[in-house]
Image (cartoon, rainbow, N blue to C red):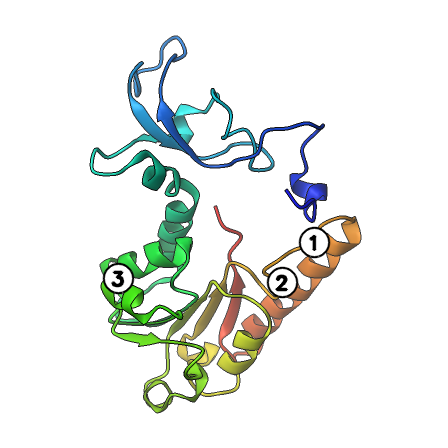
């Protein structure tokens, strides 16, 4: 809504209705639709170029982008699931290997809370995470909770003695990668170390001109190629989300 990413997510015209993921009651289905019926309560994710339209009174969604709301969840909780939970699931399916020691940076956010609950089901043997709310992290099953305002994860002796196989960076900026590649807390690419980020160096992106997109993609593509060829550092991977 700030307009900072209007080049790729801007509405075709103004005024427009914002909102991405949603939860609501089905009032009409297309002919031949067998997955859902009128009266079903579903959660669905946006299928437009940008997240818009979900806050309307009525919204057309594709059946393939929807799922029945579990009865145990409120409408509000279910509406928060589609994009963040799917992103978390894809991260775990694509990058977690059996026996991995995993560090999640920014584990208290929407994606992070889902990732932490899925990691061990996908084979992780040890999970550490950073967040200012350590009680939240512990409730999600982590083995080691780190408050980044109290200690630096890259200086923790335990992590240096047993380096991580995988870092999932949901926090962003260049600082975490710099420490991951130089502190000895993450295995080198030669030993299978991976550093996966969903936010890159710029968590608050600005896409007002094509130059902004080019610069962002150039920097991240170059780093991805360099760490694939030079295996002394963890392999850096930019996960584009869904």
What residue is shown at x 61% (from left), y 73% (from top)?
226
Residue that badge 1 annotates:
206
Residue 69 placement: quadrant: top left
Left or right for 39, reference 20: left
Left or right for 76, reference 195: left
Residue 191 placement: quadrant: bottom left
Question: Which class describes the residues within 10 Å of circle 3: few (<14), some (14-19), or many (20+)?
Answer: some
Closer to the camera, 70 or 17? Answer: 17
User: Is residue 125 visible from the viewing direction of this image?
Assistant: yes
User: Is residue 141 visible from the viewing direction of this image?
Assistant: no
Q: CB under 8 Å between callouts 2 and 1?
A: yes
Distance, label 2 to label 1, CA atoms, is 9 Å
What residue is shown at x 76% (from left), y 48% (from top)?
208
Location of residue 138 in the rendering, given as x and y in whole percent from the top left corner = 25, 68
Distance, label 3 to label 1, CA atoms, is 33 Å
Above or below residue 185? Residue 136 is: above
Mark 2 or mark 3, which is nearer the start of the sequence? 3
Left or right for 171, reference 36: right
Location of residue 89 in the rendering, given as x and y in whole percent from the top left corner = 35, 51
Q: Secondary structure at mark 3?
A: loop
Residue that badge 2 annotates:
202
Residue farthest left in this picture = 72
Question: Which class describes the residues within 10 Å of circle 1: few (<14), some (14-19), or many (20+)?
Answer: some
What residue is shown at x 69% (from left), y 49% (from top)?
4
Q: Secondary structure at mark 2?
A: loop
Above or below residue 57? Residue 65 is: below
Residue that badge 3 annotates:
140
Q: CB under 8 Å between callouts 3 and 2?
A: no
Location of residue 36 in the rendering, given as x and y in whole percent from the top left corner = 31, 19
């Amino acid at each position: 809504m700030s307009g900072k990413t209007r080049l790729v997510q801007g509405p075709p015209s103004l005024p427009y209705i914002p909102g991405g993921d949603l939860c609501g009651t089905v009032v009409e289905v297309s002919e031949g639709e067998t997955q859902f019926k009128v009266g079903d309560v579903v959660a669905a994710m946006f299928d437009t170029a940008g997240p818009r339209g979900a806050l309307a009174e009525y919204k057309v969604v594709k059946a393939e982008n929807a799922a029945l709301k579990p009865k145990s969840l409120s409408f509000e909780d279910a509406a928060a699931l589609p994009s963040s939970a799917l992103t978390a699931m894809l991260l775990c399916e694509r990058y977690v290997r059996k026996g991995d020691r995993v560090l999640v940076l920014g584990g208290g956010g929407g994606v992070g809370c889902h990732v932490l609950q899925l990691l061990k089901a996908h084979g992780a043997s040890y999970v550490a995470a950073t967040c200012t709310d350590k009680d939240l992290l512990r409730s999600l099953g982590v083995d080691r909770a780190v408050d980044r305002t109290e200690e630096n994860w890259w200086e923790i002796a335990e992590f240096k003695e047993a380096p991580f196989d995988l870092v999932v960076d949901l926090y962003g900026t260049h600082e975490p990668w710099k420490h991951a590649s130089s502190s000895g807390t993450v295995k080198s690419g030669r030993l299978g170390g991976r550093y996966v980020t969903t936010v890159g160096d710029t968590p608050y992106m600005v896409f007002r001109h094509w130059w902004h997109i080019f610069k962002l993609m150039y920097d991240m593509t170059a780093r991805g190629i360099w760490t694939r060829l030079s295996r002394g550092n963890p392999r850096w991977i930019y996960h584009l989300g869904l």
